[in-house]
Image (cartoon, grey):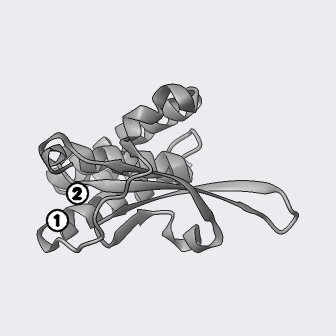
């Protein structure tokens, strides 16, 4: 066990500084999102953005690389948290990291019934044409809510 931890730490330390920063930021936002998830949704939903609004679904090539990097960092770090970091936690973490960089996104919340007839929920995040989280299962769910996150410098358009 210690050799695995040592190997992972050694690998992390060998990464370029920018990659280390992004991974640490992802871990911090995953913790933020997990705490956020514990609070009553009605009290914190206004922090997600404009309810029942969507951002544009256009591809912005100069933002494609940072969006991809954020998605990868959040998914990578979610495997190492000691708390649950599933769809909503990952989507909110990605959203807040994008917002910090002035990139808009839309968080979708959906519901469905599983194979046993039980009610299940799912969350996914889109920025432009790119899905950062939850895309692999999104088509199984009916969208019941969405939130457009428009960073401050983008809000003048709305």
Residue 143 position within the rendered picture, expressed as x and y whole percent measured from the top left: 57, 60
Q: Give 92 or 57, whichever is nearer the viewer.
A: 57
Say which residue appears at 51% left-offset and 43% top-offset.
Answer: 81
Residue 29 position within the rendered picture, expressed as x and y whole percent measured from the top left: 37, 39
For disc 1, the marked residue is: 63
Crowding near the residue tagged with mark 2, few <14, some 14–19, many ≥20 C-alpha atoms within 10 Å: few
Q: Residue furthest right?
A: 116
Q: Are marks 1 and 2 in contact (CB under 8 Å)?
A: no
Q: Give 20 or 149, whichever is nearer the viewer.
A: 149
Question: Which of the two discs, 1 and 2, labels the residue nearer the N terminus?
Answer: 2
Say which residue appears at 57% left-offset and 39% top-offset.
Answer: 83
Q: Residue furthest front?
A: 158
Picture quadrant where residue 28 is located: top left
Residue 21 position within the rendered picture, expressed as x and y whole percent measured from the top left: 22, 46
Say which residue appears at 17% left-offset and 71% top-offset.
Answer: 60
Q: Is residue 3 left or right of residue 55?
A: right
**What label sits on residue 15 in the rendered view?**
2
Is the residue 122 above or below the residue 32 in the image?
Answer: below
Crowding near the residue tagged with mark 1, few <14, some 14–19, many ≥20 C-alpha atoms within 10 Å: some
Picture quadrant where residue 64 is located: bottom left
Q: Secondary structure at mark 1?
A: helix
Picture quadrant where residue 68 is located: bottom left
Q: Secondary structure at mark 2?
A: loop
């Amino acid at each position: 066990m210690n050799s695995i931890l040592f190997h992972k730490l050694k690998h992390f330390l060998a990464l370029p500084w920018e990659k280390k920063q992004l991974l640490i930021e992802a871990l911090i936002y995953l913790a933020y999102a997990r705490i956020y998830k514990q609070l009553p949704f009605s009290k914190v939903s206004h922090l997600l953005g404009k309810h029942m609004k969507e951002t544009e679904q256009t591809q912005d090539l100069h933002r494609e690389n940072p969006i991809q990097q954020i998605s990868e960092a959040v998914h990578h770090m979610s495997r190492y948290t000691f708390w649950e970091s599933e769809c909503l936690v990952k989507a909110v973490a990605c959203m807040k990291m994008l917002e910090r960089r002035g990139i808009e996104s839309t968080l979708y919340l959906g519901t469905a019934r599983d194979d046993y007839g039980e009610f299940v929920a799912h969350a996914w995040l889109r920025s432009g044409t790119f899905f950062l989280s939850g895309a692999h299962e999104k088509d199984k769910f009916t969208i019941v809510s969405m939130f457009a996150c428009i960073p401050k410098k983008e809000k003048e358009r709305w």
